[in-house]
Amino acid sequence: MTESVFLEGYDPAAYERPSVTVDLVLMGLRGGRPAVLLQERRDPPFKKRWALPGSFVGIDEALESAAERTLHEKARLERAHLEQLYTFGAVDRDPRMRVITVSWLALLNEQDFAAALAANPALLPAAIDVPWAGDAGGPITVATPGGTPIDLAFDHAAILALAVQRLRGKLDYSEIGFALLPELFTLRQLQDVHEAILGTALNKPAFRRRMQDRGWLAATGTREEGTSYRPAELFRFQRPL
Amino acid sequence: MTESVFLEGYDPAAYERPSVTVDLVLMGLRGGRPAVLLQERRDPPFKKRWALPGSFVGIDEALESAAERTLHEKARLERAHLEQLYTFGAVDRDPRMRVITVSWLALLNEQDFAAALAANPALLPAAIDVPWAGDAGGPITVATPGGTPIDLAFDHAAILALAVQRLRGKLDYSEIGFALLPELFTLRQLQDVHEAILGTALNKPAFRRRMQDRGWLAATGTREEGTSYRPAELFRFQRPL
DNA sequence: GCAATAGTGTCTGTTAGACAATATCGA
DNA sequence: TCGATATTGTCTAACAGACACTATTGC
């Protein structure tokens, strides 16, 4: 491991290395509205500002493991849909030192979202406002449950925006939406999730047809209970074929 | 910058930091077939094996800048479509030490591809075989111009596979395909590019309509020259609206 | 029966693929 | 004129949105 071992004679030992972190966008639905779990910064920079939960990547830890560990440490959850978003590496994104962060999207269903909040009351379930604004989607904003707008620390607003954009883009053609639902759900609940994420109303028959045609829905034969009207059938997600 | 400045009291100075690199998938077309520029490794590990061109990220260098610098150092190109793909961080992806790599897709048109090759003859223009294999796309393989299969170094086969997948996925609905064409091009050339990347034939009238409807094509009024048949109109890419 | 929502059927406009007809160039 | 390819027109099948109709539950 001396000089010239590396690409083009570059000696890595002679160069300063950046810190690498993972940051998690813990998204879910709260009362049917999109929300994200934030953490208040205790120290400068951005002291007392809200930030995405994150942590440093250990030297013997895979990126995915670091994301999973962070999910467990911050939200006390064992499992969630976890997918890498993008890596942010502007030189001055952290004023203290060079930090490159690998951002991840974590999707929680309503129950897991509430459980995470209960397990770690320091987390804030911030509401995400997703204006429809055409197909590209307008600028997204975050606010406290009380409605006060939040100005996120670091470049976390950009990370969150990317998370929402990714989720929206994959919602219709991928299985990603089911990560926001419980094991058993009705078609109406599925549509509600899609509408909440997209910020727009969807056509009911067309939506049902699409989802059925995708082969994602396994009928359970059981129905929801406790309604004062006709109870809807409960479905379970199944991978096609 | 003392202890407890960081998230959750983590002291970064006390922890070993990983090296961070950028790796470039320099893709283009060579004789109408998808190709990628590779570099032979001079030293272990993977000595004499082919790898994606890459370099270490400087401590005062943004990720994107590192990618651009690498593009310039390895291919002597000033500009190209450059987009971040994914960050690979398995612990043992480099047997010597911990290296996290941020991979990038760089798209070159046929002329730039040839120029890069001329400027750096150490690069190998490897052919990418893209079987159609349904919509998801089958396993992609790389081979020398002579046809000998190439087993890429490190996890670079996975990076390349992701690059092809990304390119394919975005081809139809984004402007990405134009990065593989010269300033002026005919509709047939555009269709050829799409067919080469997708590995399948496309319907001509439908393809033309789609591209026109996207608002991407600006007619120039001029026509190609030197054909022995009816010359096609030359178009220029224009951003819609 | 009534209110409310689940679930379905049908019409219509849009879009892609198939196919073929017409246009235009060099030789 | 012919050969080759550009360019356009038309038919049809697939699909989404709109809308309305039927079904089923608790009260």
Image (cartoon, coloured by chain):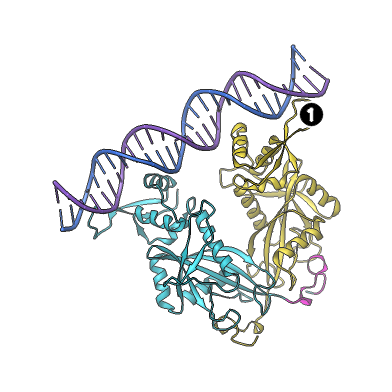
Chain colours: A cyan, B yellow, C purple, D blue
* Quarter the N terminus of chain A occupies: bottom right
Tell me the subunit letter for badge 1: B
Residue A149 in magenta stretch:
no
Main SS of the magenta part reads loop
Residue B146 in view of the camera: no
Residue B147, given in percent of the width and then of the height, sits at 75, 45
Residue shown at 49% from the left, 73% from the top: A38
Identify the element where label 1 is drawn. Answer: loop
The residue lying toward the viewer, choosing from A102 and D8, is D8
Residue B133 in view of the camera: yes
Magenta extent: A2-16
Residue shown at 75% from the left, 40% from the top: B184
The residue lying toward the viewer, choosing from A107 and A142, is A142
- Up-down relation of residue A2 to residue B45 (above or below): below
Residue B103, given in percent of the width and then of the height, sits at 68, 61
Residue A11 in magenta stretch:
yes
Residue named by callout 1: B227
Residue A9, given in percent of the width and then of the height, sits at 82, 68
Under mark 1, the amino acid is Thr
